[in-house]
Image: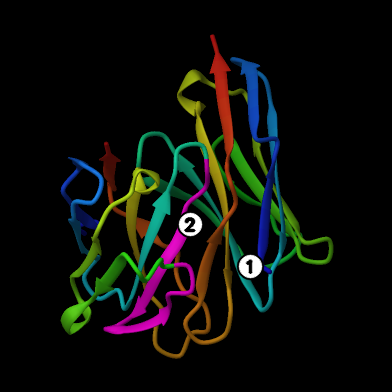
Amino acid sequence: EDKVVQSPLSLVVHEGDTVTLNCSYEVTNFRSLLWYKQEKKAPTFLFMLTSSGIEKKSGRLSSILDKKELFSILNITATQTGDSAIYLCAVFKGQGAQKLVFGQGTRLTINP
Amino acid sequence: EAGVAQSPRYKIIEKRQSVAFWCNPISGHATLYWYQQILGQGPKLLIQFQNNGVVDDSQLPKDRFSAERLKGVDSTLKIQPAKLEDSAVYLCASSLRYRGQTLNTEAFFGQGTRLTVV
């Protein structure tokens, strides 16, 4: 059975801290791993990772994939209250029409 | 570029009633997904379409849920009859795969419909 597991499930930090969110996966026919930020209802896209060891960066956010150990991390440096959200990890899997499987999410709260 | 459109935004119904949700994906996106997200959980795939064909509906409770995507564009998801445990946010998403490529692009999500069954 396909699994996408995120940790921690919940994290509370102070503004300015650095956080690392984890995502491990066990799926057949892995194609790519995606990170989303969900503040209200609609998840918004952050990163798509297909190759091991290549860091993707956007401002204070960065992410990297390890296809040998089957995990990815999302780092957020100098956190701000606006970073408070649920962070979702998802994996595209399969041949042909690819299925997008989500983890349960990490709820991040940044306190001022 | 217009995003994924969903309606309604909110719906409250009594158990055993029926309800329908509508989704219009991004123009040109062949792949359309319906997800159910219960509070505190990640999105769970209900059904995936490629154009107007179903490619995965393994987690769709077919005794009460149905979905269609006529002409490979808009899609509707119906629940009949609804149960209390159907209370959730229903998310529609779409993605593109360029001709000759092996990977889908990222999926873009609509604003979702929050369903409350009382």
Q: Residue furthest right?
A: A69
Q: Position of residue B10 (x, y in %)?
A: 20, 40
- Amino acid type, callout 1: Thr
Q: Quadrant of residue A108?
A: top right
Q: How many marks?
A: 2
Q: Quadrant of the C terminus of chain A?
A: top right
Q: Which residues are magenta?
A: B41-59
Residue linked to disc 2:
B44
**Chain under disc 1:** A
Q: Using the image as rendered, state which of residue A84 and residue B32 is in the foreground.
A: B32
Where does residue B102 sit, x and y in percent of width and height?
Answer: 53, 84
For marks 2 and 1, give the one nearer the viewer: 2
Q: How is the image coloured?
A: rainbow
Q: Is residue A74 above or below residue B93?
A: above
Which residue matches tag 1? A50
Q: Helix or strand or loop: what does disc 2 sit on?
A: strand
Q: Is residue A37 magenta?
A: no
Judged left or right of residue B51, residue B97 is: right
- The secondary element bearing badge 1 is classed as loop
Q: Is residue B45 left or right of residue A17?
A: left
Location of residue A94 in the rendering, given as x and y in whole percent from the top left corner: 58, 80
- For marks 2 and 1, give the CA distance: 22 Å
